[in-house]
Image: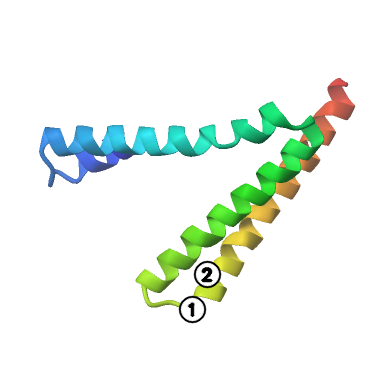
Amino acid sequence: GIHISEESECQHTDREIWESTIATFLAKFLFASTFLIPVLLLPLQHAIEVSIVWGLLVLSMLSWRMATTEHKRPWRVVAEHLFIAMAVISITNLAGKLVASVFG
């Protein structure tokens, strides 16, 4: 991912590439770990619902920040990203139900 991307640019030192790699890994690990909290504390169905809301909230905040930084319309960017996320969630859910019905 980020390591190969940074390396292929031929604009960064080895140290900068490794710092980016480690920072990216830690950020992704910490964010993913936040989804463990509802799974460990709540019944599974409720944990799934809370996790979806949490993920959409974080996506909305990051999309808003990105849009304002790039001088774009925040609501349009947020709506686009939420639409894509909901489509992915819905398609994944349908695929899971299909797999469960076939392989039960």
Horizontally, residue 35 falls left or right of residue 19, namely right
Q: Quadrant of the N terminus?
A: top left
**Rendering coords of residue 65 (x, y %):** 43, 65
The residue carrying mark 2 is: 77
**Rendering coords of residue 4 (x, y %):** 28, 36
| Residue 62 higher or lower than 79, as above or below | above
| Residue 21 higher or lower than 69, as above or below | above
> Depth check: 68 or 4 in front?
68
Secondary structure category for the residue under label 2: helix
Q: Residue at x 43, y 77 (%)?
A: 72
Horizontally, residue 64 falls left or right of residue 50, namely left
The residue carrying mark 1 is: 73
| Residue 66 higher or lower than 48, as above or below | below
Local crowd size for mark 1, using a 10 Å CA cut-off: few (<14), some (14–19), many (≥20): few
Q: Residue at x 56, y 74 (%)?
A: 75
Secondary structure category for the residue under label 1: loop
Dividing the picture into quadrants, the one containing residue 78 is bottom right
Dividing the picture into quadrants, the one containing residue 27 is top left
Q: Amino acid at mark 1?
A: Arg
**Rendering coords of residue 29 (x, y %):** 45, 32
Residue at mark 1 to residue at mark 2: CA–CA distance: 6 Å
Report if the CB atoms under discs 1 and 2 are less than 8 Å apart.
yes
Horizontally, residue 65 falls left or right of residue 48, namely left
The answer to whether residue 4 shows anywhere in this view is no
Local crowd size for mark 2, using a 10 Å CA cut-off: few (<14), some (14–19), many (≥20): some
The answer to whether residue 51 shows anywhere in this view is yes
**Rendering coords of residue 104 (x, y %):** 88, 21
Farthest residue to the top: give it: 103
Dividing the picture into quadrants, the one containing residue 69 is bottom left
Q: Amino acid at mark 2?
A: Val
